[in-house]
Amino acid sequence: MAIIIDETKRVMIQGITGREGRARTRLMREFGTNVVGGCTPGKGGQDVEGIPVHDTVAEVIEATGGVDVSVVFVPARLVKSAAIEAIEAGVKLVMLVPDRVPLWDAMAIAECAEAHGAEFIGPNTLGVISPGRAVLGMIGGRAESARQWFNEPIPGRTVGVISRSGGMSSSCGYYLSRAGLGISTICHVGGDSVLGLTFPEVALKFQADPETDAIVLFGEIGGSMEERLADLMKSGKITKPVVAYIGGKAAKEGTRFSHAGAIIEGDRGTHAGKVKALSEAGAVVVDGFGDLPEAALSVFASSTSS
Amino acid sequence: MLGFPEDAVARLHEYQGKTLLKKQGLEIPSGMVVRSPEEAGEVFQSLQGHGAERVVLKIQAWITGRKAVGGVQFAQSVEEAEAAASVMLGMKFGHFPVQEVLVEECVAIAHELFVSLTIDDAARSPLLLLDAFGGSGIEDRAAGVARIPISVTDGVHPQSIRRVLLDSPIPEKHHEAIVTAIQQIIATAKEVEARSLEVNPLVVLEDGRVLAADCRVTIDDYAVFRHPELGIEIARELDHPATALEQVAYRVEQDDHRGTFYFAQLPIEGHEDSSGLIGFHGAGGGGSMMSMDAVSNEGFTLANFCDTSGNPSAAKVYRAARVILAQPGLAGYFGSGSGVASQEQFHSAYGLAKAFNEMNMTLPVVIRLGGNAEDRAVEILEDSCRDLPATIEGYRKDDTPAFCAQRFTSLVKDESGGNSSDQLVRSVPDWVGGDAEAFPIEGGHVWINTDACDAALTARMAEWSSGLLKDDGNGNPVLAVPEEEAAKADSEFIACEIECLRAGTPVLFVDLPIEGIDPVTNSGKDH
């Protein structure tokens, strides 16, 4: 099954003629993604790697008979208009790869997505990969590396990975694979403070995915998504085992601007607060990143013996 | 420009935030920012001339609890104002020297409100936090603070603010003025694309006027490019004015958009009692944070945070390493990212190798280079640094961060006994700047010691430079491409420099002096 992306999803690329768009289109295809079209305003009629280029998202949809996902590779300042164009054209899942998208643009995209019943991933995401099936974005860098690094799902011992860090998405996938676990999907939700899909939404998708047996998290200090996931576990909406590492323990308190707006959020956002919330909800939270694979294995050991 | 200082970062001072609120029509107390005790006296006199009996002086610094550290003082005479300003302008908090003091009229406050606009990551929208029971002690009343969602496109519904006010002790006759003020605050936040904007307190005066008595604004650093009017030169949310090195680093980042380079200096108080002060070089936000945790667990004090990621060029990684090494008193250099990088890692290896060789490294180095092409990256780093005084080791994705941190600890203990080094000095080959051949590239020059070249070496240099160099027919390397094309190929030339070094024939040197660290050399001359 996998979540978010598999070989059946019809994918288009916005900004397909740019340097990044071209390079990642190649990676996605080589890994098995069904890339059906792309667009760049003013470049309609060209082709990239044999994929026809149109001027607008609507034209791609018309020419190809519909797309499930659009992956956006345009400069950060143009991401808002590109994302809104895709959502208004009817695309139900948009991935925003670029870094440095202005916060108020991300919030405007969120409002538009909400109004149209669409989802988005990012901004500032390395992507999503379902080993053996397909990839969105650029996880792995090269298709051959991605195949080497990440195991395909293994019945009864398959994890889904959710990460707030791009590099650590690959890192988690690699070390878990080395430990002998299968991977259904690795999702990098993005590194920014306002994001489309966050831990709770992605975890619910893993919960519903029959192939995923457990969920592994790479969390970070700041924001509230780890705590909100813990809330879902406490309320019984997430019942699959959760194993987590939270980065940023060493980040010194006081090095960040501390204002009343942050203080009244209580201990939400801190390393200690996140570890506590997840532990109390029943997650296995490891102190060192290197302990993550063993902790994930232990979840399977205890579930098979019980 | 609003007359902001040139080194302003994305966080604004109280007086700067108030200027923005005033532009939207919200009243602020009369006053001016001063930079000397004499100016404070003059502002006192001017405010007195307009009827003020008492003034308040407030340090302009991004610290919490200004009152508790003496950062808020009252004055009733020129002498008192000058004396208070004199003390305040000598204050320093960590990296933060107080350079500005706001002198304002004291106002007769009848009611205080806490108004804060923040970003709600769960709702993906701005959120208004509002409390009408007074501004101070807000932390203790957290549970009672109203949380009002705001639409990016439609703003806030006035009725939701009125509802909060109706439950407050503030008489109804003031409510419309308060609603207007809050809408002006929200409009300001949207206008400047604030990440947070806090007015604590918003005050109702005895005469019914509504004023912003304090203001803290942080601009979204990703949006700073759209706001030249703010005069923000360094779009970074630092907790202190940018240090000299942070300014150097920021210029490097602005001049080279291949990948991302972020550098911030950290508080180092108490590092003498730790395992040592170290230069830290991360790659990727999460990988950097995880690596910081690993090396902090070994008891080291990090002098800085640094992140080069997003497929940075060798030249950018080189400059980042140079900035890190410009910090005095380091006991070692630790680099690590996610360990399983999607990018080709040898570019970073070339950049690091160049910096370590140029600085003739005497500090132990551990770099975790795991990811695509990691074997090549580790070989480049270790082989090119084999003759340096210090041990320089590269590691791969199967070496855990904890293992690398432990290895680093033992190297630091063996090689320096935990003692820090003096400032490292950059060395440039003696044939650079003389009669050797050179051609300009962006940010510097490439020098070739042709006297030491022969046909065999030239052929290899052509290969190492990805075909940018060729044999001139006499066994000497010359440019194979137009100068304009070569000018952008700094990283290819760095690769060639390091390969020459590895082959034991250091005949090519890429001189990339960094403004603010390196003295201006005569290599700036044109050929």
Image (cartoon, coloured by chain):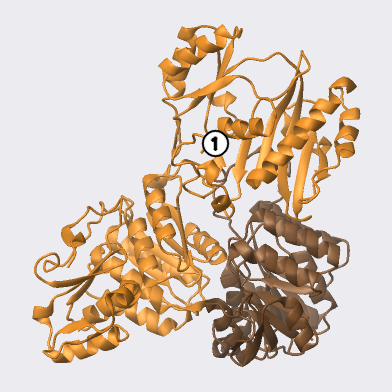
Question: Is there any visible trace of residue B108 in the rendered image?
Answer: yes
* B344 displayed left or right of B160: left
Instruction: Report which residue position mark 1 lands on.
Output: B62
Up the image or down, A40 lies above or below B520; here it is below
Whole-percent x and y of residue B160? 88, 39
Whole-percent x and y of residue B296? 49, 57
The orange-tinted chain is: B
* B62 displayed left or right of B378: right
Amino acid type, mark 1: Trp
Query: Mark 1 belongs to which subunit?
Result: B
Location of residue A145 (image quadrant): bottom right
Q: Which residue is more in the foreground, B355 or B360?
A: B355
Location of residue B134 (image quadrant): top right
Whole-percent x and y of residue B36? 41, 21
Location of residue A300 (image quadrant): bottom right
Whole-percent x and y of residue B440? 24, 68
The residue at 37%/74% (across/down) is B349
Chain A drawn in what color? brown
Which element type, helix, strand or loop, lies under badge 1?
loop
Q: How many numbered marks appear?
A: 1
* A108 displayed left or right of B504: right
The residue at 63%/72% (across/down) is A292
Q: Which residue is more in the foreground, B387 or A131?
A: A131
Up the image or down, A274 lies above or below A203; here it is above
Which quarter of the rendering shows the C terminus of chain B?
bottom left
Up the image or down, A17 lies above or below B432; here it is below
Question: Is there any visible trace of residue B140 in the rendered image?
Answer: no
| Disc 1 crowd, CA 10 A, few/some/many (<14, 14-19, 20+) | many
Up the image or down, B363 lies above or below B91; here it is below
Q: Which residue is more in the foreground, A210 or B301?
A: A210
